[in-house]
Image (cartoon, rainbow, N blue to C red):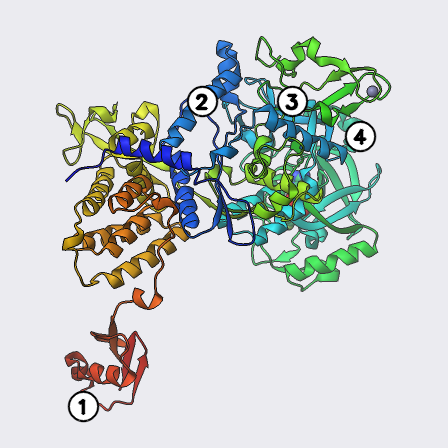
Amino acid sequence: MTSLDTQKNDARWQQQWEDAGIFRAGTPDASRPKAYILDMFPYPSGAGLHVGHPEGYTATDILSRFRRMQGWNVLHPMGWDAFGLPAENYAIKTGVHPAKTTAAAIATFKRQIRAIGLSYDWSREISTADPSYYRWTQWIFLRLFERGLAYQADVPINWCPSCRTGIANEEVHNGGCERCGTTVERRAMRQWMLRITRYADRLVDDLDGVDWPDSTLSMQRNWIGRSPGAEIDFASPAGPIKVFTTRPDTVFGTTYLVLAPEHPLVEALTTSAQKAAVEDYRQQARRKSDLERTDLAKEKTGVFTGTHATNPATGQPVPVWIADYVLTGYGTGAIMAVPAHDTRDHAFAKKFGLPIIEVVKGGRDVQEEAFTEEGVATGSPPIDGLPTAEAKKKIIPWLEQKGAGKAAVSYRLRDWVFSRQRYWGEPIPIIHCKGACGGPVAVPEEQLPVMLPDVERYEPTGTGESPLAAIRSWVETKCPKCGGPGERETDTMPNWAGSCWYFLRFIDPKNERAPFDPELVKAWMPVDVYIGGAEHAVLHLLYARFWHKFLYDLGLLSVKEPFLKLRHQGMVLAYSYQDERGAYHPYDSVDFSTDPPTLKGGGKLVAQIEKMSKSRGNVVNPEEVIQKYGADGLRLYEMFMGDFEEAKPWDVRAIQGVARFLSRAWRIVDEWEPAKAPTEDTHLRLRHATIKAVGERIESFKFNTAISALMEYSSALGQGATRADLETFVLLLCPFAPHLAEAAWERLGNKPFASTQPWPTYEAALTVNETLEVAVQVNGKLRGTFVVPRDSDEALLQQRALELEAVKRHIEGKSVRRVIVVKGRLVNVVV
Ligand code: ANZ
Ligand code: ZN
C-alpha cells in the first residue's frame, strides 16, 4: 500500500492540465450547450487569500468541471478587480506605487488560487487596472457622456474629512465613512454623475426574469425604492407648492405643509418676521446627514415660514413650515403633512400644536397615535367609504380635474456620484476646454487610454482635488476639439467601475479594436451562474446591471440581464479560543487532541464561533491547509463544512474527517486487484443512485450532501468493487477532488485525464430501491408498516395491510367500509 504524496500529486496534475489546455473554453457553437460560470473576481489584497475565497471558487469549479464532463462548453475565467483603496493608502504611507503592490498581490493570489487546482481558463485573465482593460472602461464612459448619461453637477456630496475624498451614498454606513468610520459631512462640489435613475424602472422590472436569492432581489428593489403615488399642487403666494405623496387619499387630512430647508421656494415664502428664525434653521440643517434628519426617534424640529398655502381638496388654508425631516433629494422636496396617518407628521404636529384630522377609519384614536395602515376613507367627500387602495386610485383623477395633481412615481435611487478625488482609479477621459468650446470635451477614442501618470505624492490634496491635479504637465493640454488650451479632468472613477463590465471582457479579453466582439458576447451571455459574497447584493450588482442595460441600448448586447442565476456563499466563520481570563489563544497554542480542546501545557479554554480575525488568532490560511491535507483536502472541506449558502464555522478538527475519507478513497483504488474483483455486480443500484444523487446535488448547490453520497458509496466499495464501481466513483469524485481522481484514474490503468471523461450516466429505473415501505392507517391513524416489492399490485397491498396484527386489533368487531390505497406509500383502512 502506498499513500498519496499530495504535494507532488497536486503539482503534477496542475501542470499537466495546464500543458494540455483542457480548461480553455471552446468556440461557442450550436453543437453543445454552453455554461458561463463566473466568480465575483477578487480585489487582490496584500494579505493574500482567505479561506472564505475558496468556498465560492471551489463551488463554481465543481460545477464547471461537472458541466465539462457532461460535454458542455464551459467558460470559467478569473481576473482581478485591481483598483482600490488599500493599495492607495499603502502608497500614501510608504510611497510605493500602487501598481507595484497590486502586481505583487496579484502574483500571490494567482499562486494561491492555482494551488487549489481550480479549472480557470487563464488565457482570459484580466486586471481592471491594466491600461488595455481600463481603456475600454473609459470608452464606455465616453459613450455615456455622448448620450448625456454622464454629466457634471454641483451636488452636496458626502465628504469624508479623514479620507479627504467624496464618497457615494452607498459607502456611508450609519453616517460614517465605510472605510475609516469618520463621520461624513456634506459638501457641495462639482462631480461627475451617471444618470442611473433613467434606468430605474428597468432595473426593477427586469428582476422578474432572474433566479436570485429573494433577499437579494428585495435589497435591489428597496435600493431603487420605487413608490407610486401623486404630485399635488398647493397654491401659495409664492406660486404652487408641489408635494409628492404615496397617500393622495389622505389629502383632506392635510393640516400643514413642510418644505425641505433647501427648497427653492423657502425664501419667497418666508415673511420678514420669520426670516431670522428660518435662516438660522437652514444653517443648522446643513450640518446634518440624511440619516440623522430622517431618524424616526429623533426629536422633530422645524420653523414656520409665516405663510399659508391652500389645500386644493378642502379650499382651507394650511401653514407652510420648513423642517429637516423632509429631504431635498426625494420626491419634490415638499410634503403635505397628514399627522393622523403618518408617524413623523404626528410627532411634529404634537410638538408644534398643529391640528390632527382623521381621514382614514381604522379604529384608533389618531389624536394619540397615527393610524398608518390601510382603512376606509372618511371626511373626504369624493372617496368616503372607499378602502384605501381604491380611494388612492379614485382621488387622483378628481384632483387632476381640478388642475391640482397627477399620478407620479418617486424613486429612492439617486444618480450615481461617479467622481473620486483619488489616484488609484481609471482617469476620467475628459478635457475641460478653456478656449472656444468652454466646457468638457471627450478625449478622442484613438487617444485612449488616458494613462494614469506617475505622481510623487498620493494624498488627495484636501481641497477636494485628486493628486493628479498636482501634475501640471499632465493636466495642461490642448482641447481636442478647438485646439485651444485645455485641462485634463483630474478625478478618477470609483472602484465599482471596472467590475461593471468585466464579465463581458472575459469573453473577448484580447480585443484591441473594441471592448468585445458583440457576436462572441451574444454566444456566451448571459452569465449562467454567478457566485459571490452577499456584501455585493446591492451595489456591484446594481451598477453592473445598469452598464449592461446601457450597452444593450447601444445595440452591443442581446440579453437584458447579465446574471441569470446568482448565489451567495455563506460566510466562513471560525472557532476562537479564550482562556478563563478572556485572553484569545491562536490555534498553534491549542491542543486539539483533547475534547474539548485545551491549552497546550494545560489550561481550560472556551470555544466561540466568531468572524475570523487576527486579534482572535483564528484566521485559517488556505496555503497551510493545502500543505497539510493537499488541495483536495481543502476543496472537500470547504464544501463539506455545511450548507453552501449558510454561514458556518471552520473546524480545525472536522477537516481530519474529510482527509480520512480521501485517504480511504485512494486506498480502495490503490489496493484493488482485478483478479479478486467480485463477478457479481452487487452495487449496481447503489452505483446508479449515487450518480443521480451527486449530479443533482451539484446542480442544486448541495455540495455537502453530494460528498456524503460519495462517502456512502465508498464505504460499500470497501467490501468488494467491480471496475465499473471504481471508475464511476473516481469520475464522480473528480469535480470535488480532481488531483486524487486523476491519480486514481491512472492507477486503474487509464490514460489521462479523468477530468475529460464523460460524466457517468444512470438508468432511472435502477436508482430506486427494489423494495418499498408502506404505511398502514386505520381511520387515518398510523398503525403499522410493512415492506413489499416495489412493483406489488393493489390487491397485495390490501391483503398485507389487513394481515398486520395491529390493524387486526383495531378493526376487530367493526366492519371495514373502505380500503384506500395510495400506491407506493400508504394503505388507509376505513371502519
Ligand atoms: C402624505 C402622507 C400621508 C404620506 C400618509 C404618508 C402617509 P416612500 O414610501 O418612501 O416613497 N415624503 C415625500 N417626500 C418626502 C421627502 N422629500 N422627505 C421626507 N418625506 C417625504 O414615502 C413617501 C411618503 O413620504 C410621502 O407620502 C410623504 O408623506 C413622505 F398618511 O404624503 B406622504
Ligand atoms: Zn475647445
Kindly identify which numbered label has been placed on residue 427: 3
Residue 495 picture quarter? top right
- Provide the residue designation for mark 1: 813
Residue 102: image x %, image y %? 49, 21
Q: Earlier in the sequence, mark 4 or mark 1?
A: 4
Q: Is residue 60 left or right of residue 669?
A: right
| Closer mark to the observer between disc 2 and disc 1 | 2
Disc 4 to disc 3, C-alpha distance = 48 Å
Tell me the mark number nearer the camera, choosing from 2 and 4: 2
Q: Quadrant of the N terminus?
A: top left
Alpha carbons under labels 4 and 1: distance apart? 96 Å
Task: Report x, y in % for residue 26.
Answer: 51, 44
Give the residue number, with chain letter if any, for mark 2: 105
Q: Amino acid type of disc 2?
A: Ala
> Of 43 and 397, which appears nearest the observer?
43
Single out the mark in the foreground, 3 or 2: 2
Image vertical order of residue 402 relative to residue 422, above or below: below
Q: Quick one: SS at disc 2?
A: helix
Q: Which tag is nearer the camera, tag 1 or tag 3?
A: 3
